[in-house]
Image (cartoon, helix red, strand yellow):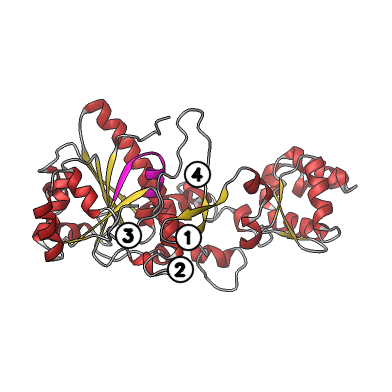
Amino acid sequence: MPKPLDGVRILDVTAVVMGPYATQILGDMGADVIKVEAPQGDTMRRVGPMRHPDMGHMYLNLNRSKRSIALDLKQAAGREALLALARTADVLVYNVRPKAMARLGLSYGDVRAVNEKIIYVGLVGYGQNGPYAEKPAYDDLVQGSVGLAALMTRSGSSAPRYVPMTLADRTVGLHGVIAITSALVYRANTGLGQEIQVPMFETMASMVLSDHLSGAVFDPPLGPTGYQRLLSPDRRPFQTSDGYVCVLIYTDAHWARFFQAIGQEDVLRDDPRFATMGSRTEHIDSLYKMVSDIMRSRTSAEWLRLLDEIDIPVMPMHTLDTLIDDPHLRDIGFVGTAQHPSEGPIRTIGVPGTWSVSQPAESRPAPRVGQHSVEILREIGYDDETLARLLEQGALVDAGGND
């Protein structure tokens, strides 16, 4: 069956994590994603471990469902080739600073001149109408500048630290997917292409503030910033007598069943601090500390069995190694293996979610640098003589073979 974005062509002028993550999702959804790389390739190719040069582990999981063309956009012939591709494209997405695109002669105006209906999307660091517009942006910088590192100390960490994953890159990449698919719908309804910028800083700031404005929502403030339940030092996996479990006792019914199951029904009745959701939130540190002490009295297996029986949300605390072998993920085939044409057997990550008709799925393995360069330009009419000249000039790089 056709996938949701079959027939959509996307020029992916992105690198590292944020942009490639967005375009990988769009590729899984069926779009023809043409990854436009510099002759040396995406820098993420060189982050190991890897079996062969330029095929690093993160690159493989960020760039499936794409074809690769390697162009030197600083050469006139490379730029002309990209503009020729833009004539056939629905979307161009980039993640460098807009002025860098303009210096290459690939601004929105330049691209729109060859395709007025194109959707031109910049995944940028900061909104271009403020004083941070020209600052470089990376995941670590954005996490710190929107308050995530400081929130760690408010929740019990001994020092500020970043969340140990590329949280900002991937979150903003998802917002990029939303922007692109929404713009495609808008164009289908109106016939209009447009320029869109999705800024990392503002996107992450909106998420953090939505959780943690708290009393500062009101003017004058009704209290300090920070959602206390999320900041409680004991909002963490609870230690048991032999390990850890993840538990969320949240609603009135959850708390009633929990205290009944451990023989302490009187807590909610006799202690006004814990009688309602509002009072529990106000005294959440004391409540979570009480639960933390109680959880140490039984094994992880005992708590998992008991809390499942009384319908209280609970999950085992996985490590990265045990997550790979999680029985649910194993049974649905989410983490699988595949034979990569150049890298041999690799572990693959599935597409989350199920669609009754147009299920997204990986369409091709992550490509070598310029693996499809000649194939792609032949599709838009480049002849052998022109291709040979581009290859000789170094404006085009081809890996050879299109497996």
Q: CA distance from mark 3 to mark 1?
A: 24 Å
Name the N-terminal-most of marks 3 and 2.
Answer: 3
Quadrant that contains the N terminus: top left
> In the rendered structure, are the residues bearing label 2 and label 1 in contact, judged by CB atoms less than 8 Å apart?
yes
Q: Which residues are magenta?
A: 24-34
Q: Nearer the viewer, residue 108 or 289?
A: 108
Disc on res. 15: 3
Q: Is residue 135 above or below residue 174?
A: below
Name the N-terminal-most of marks 3 and 1.
Answer: 3
Name the N-terminal-most of marks 1 and 4.
Answer: 1
Q: CA distance from mark 3 to mark 4?
A: 21 Å
Q: Nearer the viewer, mark 2 or mark 1?
A: 1
**Residue at 76% across, 47% down:** 274
Q: Which residue is mark 4?
A: 351
Disc on res. 257: none
> In the rendered structure, are the residues bearing label 1 and label 4 in contact, judged by CB atoms less than 8 Å apart?
no
Q: Which residue is mark 1?
A: 344
Q: CA distance from mark 1 to mark 4?
A: 21 Å
Instruction: Name the residue type under label 2.
Output: Arg
> In the rendered structure, are the residues bearing label 4 and label 2 in contact, judged by CB atoms less than 8 Å apart?
no
Whole-percent x, y for residue 388 in the image: 12, 58
